[in-house]
Amino acid sequence: MFSRVTTDDLLRLRDIVGPANVLTPDDDIEPYSHDETEDFVFPPEAVVKPRSAAEVAAVLRLADARLVPVTPQGARTSLSGGALPVFGGIALSLERMNRILEIDAENLFAVVEPAVITQVLQEEVEKVGLFYPPDPASRGSCTIGGNVAHGSGGPRALKYGVTKDWVYGLDAALPSGEILRTGGKLLKNVTGYNLTQLLVGSEGTLGVVTRATLKLIPKPLLAKTLLAPFPDPVSAARAVTRIFRARIVPCACEYMERAAVQAAERRKGEKFPCSDAEALLLIEVDGNREEQLDAEIETIAECCVACGAPDVYPATDPGRREFLWTMRRSIGEAVKALSAYREEDTVVPRVRLPELVASIREIAARHGIRAIGYGHIGDGNIHVNLLKGELPDDEWERRLDPAVRELFERTLALGGQITGEHGVGFVQKKYLPLAYPPHHIELLRTLKRAFDPNGILNPGKVFPD
């Protein structure tokens, strides 16, 4: 189906990006053979590091003509296998395209290259009083291009939306070598199909993003944070629904099971408040008037106590607030360090959350697999880590797929979906037929063929084999 990278291909690639920016197996290409997804390893035949959109386009044009597969890569923090070079070929690392091109404080937009680290952009716009809200847990290492490719979310998605809600324009190189330019610094634009949003979340299968135009807003002046322990996960989920019924929309509402918090404690070597509680909610509100935020925190506390929290604990100073969020962001890596694992990214309508969190434990127990849950409960998105623990390899393999299928079937029955922010990628593609009927998947394949007729761009992702 695909061609291998030849000596002549390497010469031509070096002509495009410079000899120092083409790596082969004789160099250290191990980092480009995996991302943050379990323990999958797929070595590329070559790593190519372009510096401009023109170089990206030229590499794609060559690869398309030669039928060489290309896997776009950013910081390789994907949790769905999105950056794995499944068919070898070229790992197209965009790491050198890392400039913030413009911060337009008049129109409230930023224009950036794909390898800009999300937290770096946030800190730069905050220097001029502006705010870019999307904040994946890996914001200190993930890139804007990767966020766009996966439609990334994060804690603040509850109030501010996910990456797609902040992307107003894209430049993307197509396999043909053409540069597609969509949208721009326009808050309104219904000129033709919305190709900007088609590219967002397409997981690098339709085009390679080379520039993004992102909306900004004025930064809220204040934020207040509260930690609430609960006797069980269902009580915590019910509290979330009660908070919204009280007409409060927090900017973040995070859920953590006891095992997740205690894993973070061990990894960080620090004590987390109330870590013996079965479940905790970390809730934050933001705005510009202190009296309003104080009133909201008081109402949230009342809602939590009414749903079973024995008490609530405000973070009364910035240092304490930062500590709680640092611990929360460390949970993912801490849980994954416990054993071999499979992370699922379930999402349901918020009102069905109590049923989802109850189902997670029930399904895991029935299949004899340990499950640890945490995530963005405010928008219905729970990350479920299924852990191998001491199970023998063959027993783990035998139990895992039925457990995942049942989890997804239950999630879908609750009106949810199989991924909320991590993407389908490599690891979830075989479950896509659970989510969509054949005609829906064929329509997705038709779109893929329209952008990438030869199928060279990030093959082995999204679509079931």
Image (spheres, rainbow, N blue to C red):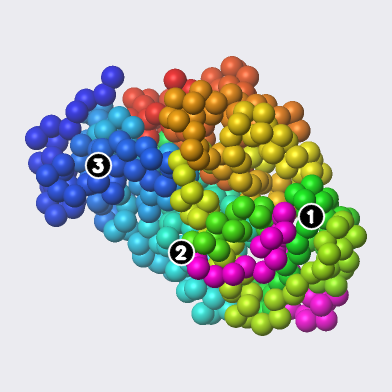
Assign a secondary structure to mark 1. loop
Quarter assignment of residue 66: top left
Magenta region includes residue 275: yes
Q: Can the viewer see residue 248 in this picture?
A: yes
Assign a secondary structure to mark 3. helix
Image-based side of 335 in relation to 83, left or right? right
**Gap in Å between the C-alphas at discs 2 and 1?**
33 Å
Task: Classify the position of the N terminus by image quarter.
Answer: top left
Query: Do residues under tags 3 and 1 come within 8 Å of each other at their CB atoms?
Result: no
Image coords of residue 211 (percent x, y): 41, 55
Image coords of residue 123 (percent x, y): 49, 73
Q: Nearer the viewer, mark 3 or mark 1?
A: 1
Give the residue number, with chain letter if any, for mark 1: 231
Q: How many marks?
A: 3
**Gap in Å between the C-alphas at discs 3 and 1?**
56 Å
Image-based side of 182 in relation to 62, left or right? right
Magenta region includes residue 8: no
Of labels 3 and 2, earlier in sequence is 3
Q: Nearer the viewer, mark 3 or mark 2?
A: 2
Give the residue number, with chain letter if any, for mark 2: 140
Give the residue number, with chain letter if any, for mark 3: 59
Image coords of residue 349 (percent x, y): 76, 42
Which residue is pictured at 54% across the width and 76% down the height?
A: 126
Q: Magenta residues? A: 268-296
Of 224 and 54, which appears nearest the observer? 224
Assign a secondary structure to mark 2. loop
Image-based side of 213 in relation to 384, left or right? left
In the picture as drawn, the residue positioned furthest to the top comes out as: 438
Of labels 2 and 1, earlier in sequence is 2
- The crowding category of the residue bearing disc 1, from other C-alpha atoms within 10 Å (few below 14, some 14 to 19, many at least 20), is some
Which residue is pictured at 26% across the width and 33% down the height?
A: 88
